[in-house]
Amino acid sequence: MISSRDTIFYWWMSFLLAFIILGAFVVLLSFVEGQEILEISTHIPWTMLVSVYVFFVVSGSGMCVITSLGHVFGIKRYELISKRGVFFASIAIMSGLLAILLHLGHVERAFVYVYLSPNLKSGILWMGFFYSVYLLFVIIEYLLLARADMAKIANTSTGYKQVFYSLLVFGRKDESERSVHLDHKLAKAAGGSAFVTGLAAVSTLGAVFAHTEARSLWYGAFYPAYFVLSATFSGLSFFLFITILTYWIRGEEIGDKLSRLICELGKLLALMLSMGLLFNSWMIFSSVNNPEKINSIMLLINGPFSFSFYVFEILLGTIIPIIILLTPKVTHRGIFVSSLLVLMGLFVMRYNFVTAGQVLPVLKEGLPSYFPTFFEIVITLGITALFALLYTFGVKFLPLKETNH
Amino acid sequence: MAWEDSNLTRRDFIKLMGAAPASLAVNPKTGERRYAKLMDTFKCIGCRRCMSACKRWNKLPPYEVPETLVRDMDGTTYTVVNFVRSSRNGEIGKFLKWQCQNCIKPACAGVCPVTAITKNPVTGAVVIDETKCIGCRYCYQACPFKVPRFDFHKRITRKCHLCYDRIPKLKPACVAACPVEALDYGYRDLMLRKARVKAQLVRGYVLGEKEAGGTDVITILPAPPEEMGLIVAPQKIVSEDIDRLRISSTGFLAGAVLAGVLYLFSRGSGDKE
Ligand code: SF4
Ligand code: SF4
C-alpha cells in the first residue's frame, strides 16, 4: 500500500530530480556552446556559481561552530542538534563544492595538478584543501554520531536495508554502552578537527577574495574576519530554517527541549546579525575617507547595487529579522520567517559581494546587467535541488532527529 | 637613436641613463641581462599587423571587430590596437598596442593554485601552461591590468606570452611584423633608456617602469595612463606574498577569537556534561 505521504514524497523527489536533470543539461550545453552561456560578461568571470558556492560553504562551515558547542565545548543541550547540524554541514559543503567545480574550466585537471604542482602561496589551493578536509571530518563525525542508531536498524532489519546500514556503520554493529561511549569520544575528536578546519576554511575563503589587491572592494584585512563572523549567522539561519520546516512538513511536534533550544538559537542569531551589521557599518564608514576604497563601496551604497543592498541585505536580511527575533515570546513561526529572510538577504549579499567586487577597475561604465543569465539560474536551481534531495534523503533514511541520549 | 638629433643635453642624457636600478636590469640570481619589449605610441600607425602576426604565430581564429570599434582582448586575441585619446586634451591621441604587460613580479603567477603561470626572469615572458590551467580565473582577478582572458571553448585562461617560443633568438611575432619599428624587443636596460629619452623628447610617459613594480613591456604613452583612460596599476608590486599572509592571518585571528568566545560561553552556561 502506498500512503498519501509516500505519494507526496515521490512527487517531491521527482520534482527535485527534474531540476537536477535540467541543471545537468545546462552543464553539458556549456561544453557544446562554450562556457560563455554562464557569464554575464567576460569581465565578470566570477558570478552566480561562485556566489552559490560561497553561500553554501559559508553556511556549512558556520554550522560547525554551532554543533561544536555540544560535542566539542560540552554544552549538553546543544548535543540535541548535533546530528542534524553535522549532516547539514556535510551536504551544504558538498553542494557548494559542486558549484565551484562546475565553475572551473577543467575540473579533471584540478584534481591532478593540485598534487603535481601545487602553488602553496595561492589562497584557492588552501581553500580547496581546508574544505576537502573539513568535509571529510564532518562526514566522519556524522557517521560516528549516528552509528549507534544505524547499528540498531541494521541489527533489526533484513535484506537491502540491512546491507545499506551495515555499510554505513562499516560493519560495526555493536550496540553496547562501551562502543557508544567510544563513538562519542571519537566524535568529539572529529568534531574538534572539523571546528578548526571549518574556521580555517571559511577564513581562507574570505582571504581568496581579500588577497586581490587589484579588486578594491575585496582587498584588505576585513573580509577574512567578516567571513568568519558571517558564517555563524549563515549557518544558524540555514539550520533553523530547515529544522523548523522539516518538523512542520512531517507533521511532527517539536519537543520541549528542542523548542527551547530553537528559541535560544534565535536569540543567538539576532546577536550575530547585530554584530555583522556593526562590522559592516564600521567597514563602510572607515572606507569613506579611503580614496582607494570609496569608489567600490559607492557601488553598494549609492550605485547599481544600492537597491538590493539596502532592501535585501540591510532591511529584509538584517534589521527586520533582528526585530522579530528580539520580540519577547517570539514563536517558531517568527523564527522561521526571520531565518528565511536572513537566508534571502545572505544570498543577495553573496551575489552582490562577488559581482560588485569585479566592476572596478574595468567596467567604468557600469555593469552590463545586474541579473545572472538564464542558464546560470537553471544551474543554481539544479544545485539547490540537489541539496534539497540530499537533505530529504537524510530525513527519510538517516538518523537526524533530535532525540535525547 | 633618437637622441642624436634632439636638443637633449649630454647631462640630461647621462642622468637618464644612470637611473635604472640594477635589480631590474639583470636577473639577480644569474646576473644575466634581462629582456623587455618596447612599444612606442608615437611611431605606431595603427595598421594592426601586430594583431594579425600574433594570430598567425599562435594559430588563433580571426578577430571579430565589435560594433563599438573599441577592440578588447579575448580568449583568442592576445593583443589589440586602439586609438586612445587624452581626457585632458582631446588633441592628444595615439594608437596604442595593448597586451599582457609581462610583469617582473606577476600577481597572476602568485595566485594561480596549480602553478600554471611561470615567469622567465631573463626573457621576460609570463606564460600560462595551457595544459595545466584549470580555468579558475583567479589570475584575472589578481592582475593589476586586468589582462588574462578566458577562452570559453578551450575552457582555459589565455593571454600574451611574449612569444616565449621565439624569444630571445627571434623577436616576438608582433615586433617582427611592425612595418614602422614602433615595437622593439631587446635588453631591458636599453629599452628603458630608449623609452626615457623618447619620453623626455616628446613629453610623454614611460609606462612599465614602475607600474606593478616594473613590467617587461614598456610603452611610451603621450600622457599618464589615467589620462589616457587606461587601467591604472599601482606603482608597486601587487599582491605580494607578505601582504597576502597579513590578510590571511586576520581571518585566523578572527577564528581564534570566536573559539575563545565559545569557550567562555560554554563555561558560563552551566550545562556541562
Ligand atoms: S599584466 Fe597581468 S597577466 Fe600579465 S604578467 Fe602582469 S599580472 Fe600577469
Ligand atoms: S585560470 Fe588557469 S592560469 Fe589562471 S589562476 Fe586559474 S589555473 Fe592559473
Image (spheres, rainbow, N blue to C red):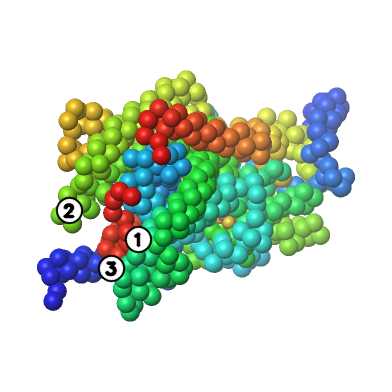
Upstream in the sequence, badge 2 or badge 1? 1
- Which mark is nearer the camera, 2 or 1? 1
In the picture of the structure, the residue carrying the numbered disc 1 is A149
Subunit that carries the residue with mark 2: A
Residue A152 locus on image (x, y percent)? 34, 65
User: In the rendered view, does A260 fall on the left or right side of A7?
Assistant: right
Label 1 to label 3, Cα distance in Å?
29 Å
Q: Chain of mark 1?
A: A
- Residue at position x 11%, y 68% in the image: A4
Between residue A51 and residue A171, name the one nearer to us: A171
- Say which label, 2 or 3, has the lower sequence index: 3
Front residue of A14/B162: it is A14
Measure how far apart labels 2 and 1 are at the Cα level: 19 Å
Query: In the image, which disc is placed on residue B28?
Result: none
| Residues marked 1 and 3 touching at CB (< 8 Å) | no
Count numbered badges in the picture: 3
Same chain check for tags 2 and 3: yes
Residue identifier under label 3 = A17
Residue furthest to the top:
A289
Q: Which residue is mark 2?
A: A252
Outermost residue to the left: A4
Depth order, front residue of A73/A20: A73
> Alpha-carbon distance for marks 2 and 3?
26 Å
Q: Nearer the viewer, mark 1 or mark 3?
A: 1
**Left or right of B218: which side holds A226?**
left
Secondary structure type for disc 1: helix
Element at badge 2?
loop
* Residue drawn at 75 percent across, 61 percent down: B166
- CA neighbours of label 3 inside 10 A, class few (<14), some (14 to 19), many (20+): some
